[in-house]
Image (cartoon, rainbow, N blue to C red):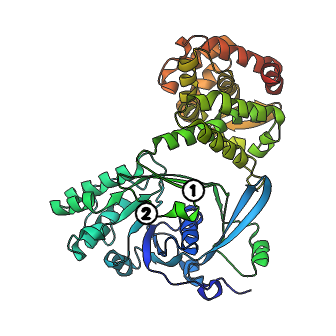
Amino acid sequence: MELLNKQKTGKKERPVKVLQFGEGNFLRAFVDYMIDIANERGEFNGDIVLVKPIEFGSLEQFHKQECQYTVQLRGLVGGEPKKLNRVVTSVADAVDAYSEYEKYAQYAKLDSLRYIVSNTTEAGIVYDDTERLEMEPPKTYPGKLAKFLYERYQHFSGAQDKGLVILPVELIDDNGVHLKECVCKLAKLWGLEDAFVEWLDNACVFTSTLVDRIVTGYPKDEVEQLCEEFGYKDELIVTGEPFALWVIESTKDLSDEFPLPRAGLPVIFTDNQKPYKQRKVRILNGAHTSFTLASYLAGNDIVLQSMNDELILDFIKATIFDEIIPTLALPKQDLIEFAEAVLTRFRNPFVKHEHLAISLNSVSKWRARCMPSFVAFIEKHSRVPKHLAFSLASLMAFYTGSERRDKALIGHRGEEEYRIMDDDAVLDFFAEHSGKEAAEFTHAVLSNTDFWGEDLSVRPNVEETVAAYLSDIRELGMRAALEKNFEK
């Protein structure tokens, strides 16, 4: 079977407009996929060069396939399970910043270059004062970027029209702000001229972005079957879900020069991404965290089972639509549409998302994802949101155990053991307190300011409500407790 390559895809050569730090699955199934569509629809006309920003790993397969690869999106489309295939031809080349430094560095002098995209993990955007300008290349991503931008600034004599748009997608708050801070600190560390920093401010645009798509990566167990279906060999296949969202925050309006929305792509340009981040964290992540522990204790192992469990599904919908959405500031119809998309994503028959995997560090997750809705609902309506309160009782029921083993606390679902994974201090607390009677245990948890940043036990009716739900779970079992309190 013939290996996928440029001749087979009929790739059109376009000017290189994007340099991408990171060749991993997410960027290839998200950014490169979107740019491929924009090229096809006549809105972008630009190619991408991938940069391997770390020393280990290999680009061998990229070179064998001339950077051509297939993305298969799997999920519900119009209520039906679908697989959507696209051969991505937007990537022109891949370069190793270490073993091919000179080739990599030459891209700083490329007239057509306009955008830099990165996904160097959450730990990638860090300031390191051991970096030196003469390194080829510097170790960190901010170091590489600072040197790359400085060499471009020098080559084009500080021309204002040769600045770049920086699009980091690392999953940290205000990723562009932090990246620019690192670059500016390195410029100062290296003693670079003030005019370069002014060029960074005036000619370059550092955006902060929010991205959303589940990318499940290389389907190693299905590769032979998929290649038979495609009619060619592809060792770079990437799979993911159909849903996608890219929110780009910047002080400059980029919508005309980076016109992905005109190509029908789910990209939002804004001067404030925080409402969109809040929407994602509260609805998508908050819903996950609010039901996953209760659903697991009710007998479901994966999210898809939960969506097919009417009792759990009703709980999820009530949590989202009755208790989370009323606390958010975006237009209600936008929130409802996003929530419906979330439910569709939870129903994805191709994703086996295990509740035990989601349960990792549930205490800090509940604080970040559920507690803001919980508190906002109380302050807005002067009553306790019962589904979110039940999710907190479910957390306590899930975190019940006295035995520590292999860095975990051991819990029990009937006769079955499960591993509770969290910070040692959290697990030690629950090992000490979870055996107490419901009211005492609830008080200990809610009054733990290290967990919540405040004493939740002093909020009116919270402790009594949560303790009552916990008593029901203990006495009746999770499913019967849900039926008693929420069955229609």
Q: Position of residue 280 (x, y in %)?
A: 57, 42
Q: Are marks 2 and 1 in contact (CB under 8 Å)?
A: no
Image position of 185 with respect to 276: above or below: below
The quarter of the picture where residue 16 lies is: bottom left
Image quarter in which the C terminus is found: top right
Circle 1 crowding by C-alpha within 10 Å: few under 14, some 14–19, many from 20: some
User: Residue at 80% of width from left, 55% of height from top?
Assistant: 80
- How many dots with numbers? 2
User: Residue at 51% of width from left, 84% of height from top?
Assistant: 13
Task: Give the residue type at disc 1.
Answer: Pro
User: Residue at 34% of width from left, 78% of height from top?
Assistant: 110
Question: Is residue 134 at all visible to an observer of this figure?
Answer: no
Identify the secondary structure beneath mark 1: loop
Instruction: Work out how far the residue at label 2 is from the one at label 1, CA to CA, in angstroms.
Output: 15 Å
Residue beneath disc 1: 266
Residue beneath disc 2: 256
Q: Position of residue 127 (x, y in %)?
A: 32, 53
Q: Position of residue 152 (x, y in %)?
A: 28, 72
Q: Nearer the viewer's eye, disc 2 or disc 1?
A: 2
